[in-house]
Amino acid sequence: ETGVTQTPRHLVMGMTNKKSLKCEQHLGHNAMYWYKQSAKKPLELMFVYNFKEQTENNSVPSRFSPECPNSSHLFLHLHTLQPEDSALYLCASSQVGTDEQYFGPGTRLTVT
Amino acid sequence: GQNIDQPTEMTATEGAIVQINCTYQTSGFNGLFWYQQHAGEAPTFLSYNVLDGLEEKGRFSSFLSRSKGYSYLLLKELQMKDSASYLCAVRASGGSYIPTFGRGTSLIVHP
């Protein structure tokens, strides 16, 4: 198993759809993150979970709803998205107190 | 807040040396990271600097000057597979331990 996996890798959804992105880490880490990566823009931190508790929400619209049922799994529930939400959504994990984050391959989301 | 600046794109020749610069302004400083990201893939960790000086790791080296708010990533003996985006990320002291990323530098290595 690779360290951090994400499914699906590609997703096309209409503005009225509801979908979920899944992330799983096999590294025994206790912190997980959602990032948004748009073309020509820096990686934007969306949510942080430490020990399954959400510790950061960077003013993300409510149409994005995270869920962290345990320290190995992280979900991002999507509903009534806008075309400008089209981007690469990256999941990462780390061990709290260490420096390095391990990223998953991302989900390429297109909102039509 | 934090401001991180790096060139958008650079090109270099296979076998050459390239230096990718990153300047930052931050309220306090607690480390600078470099990540490599190939197109369509996950960013992967390259280096971490928290003290001034040069950290060498094989063909890659990273330098930090805290007084100048400046870092560079040096890639030697360039290979075609080094074509990727290189992300500079800075962690501020106090508050969140999570780094803020720059826009990334797209490096194109040609024969």
Image (tube, coloured by chain):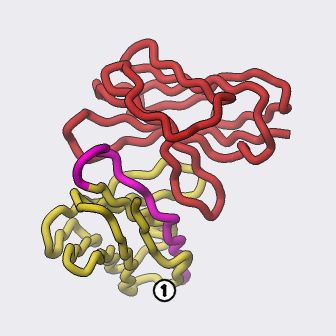
Chain colours: A red, B yellow
Does dot 1 land on a helix, a strand or a loop? strand
Residue at the location (40% across, 55% down)? B100
The magenta-colored residue range is B93-111
Residue B76 in percent (x, y) is at: 32, 79
Question: Which residue sits at x=68%, y=26%?
Answer: A78
Using the rendered image of the protein, determine whether residue B52 is visible from the camera's viewpoint: yes
Residue A105 seen by the camera: no
Three-letter amino acid code at disc 1? Thr
Residue A70 screen position, x and y as percent: 39, 14
Residue B19, horizontal then vertical, whole percent: 36, 82
Chain ID at mark 1: B
Residue B53: quarter of image? bottom left
Q: Name the residue under label 1.
A: B13
Return the residue nearer the eye: B5 or B49.
B5
Image point 36% across, 71% down: which residue?
B24
Q: In this view, does A43 lie to the left or right of B44?
A: right
Q: In this view, does A23 lie above or below B102?
A: above
> In what quadrant of the picture does the N terminus of chain A appear?
top left
Residue A2 percent across, percent down from the top left: 41, 33
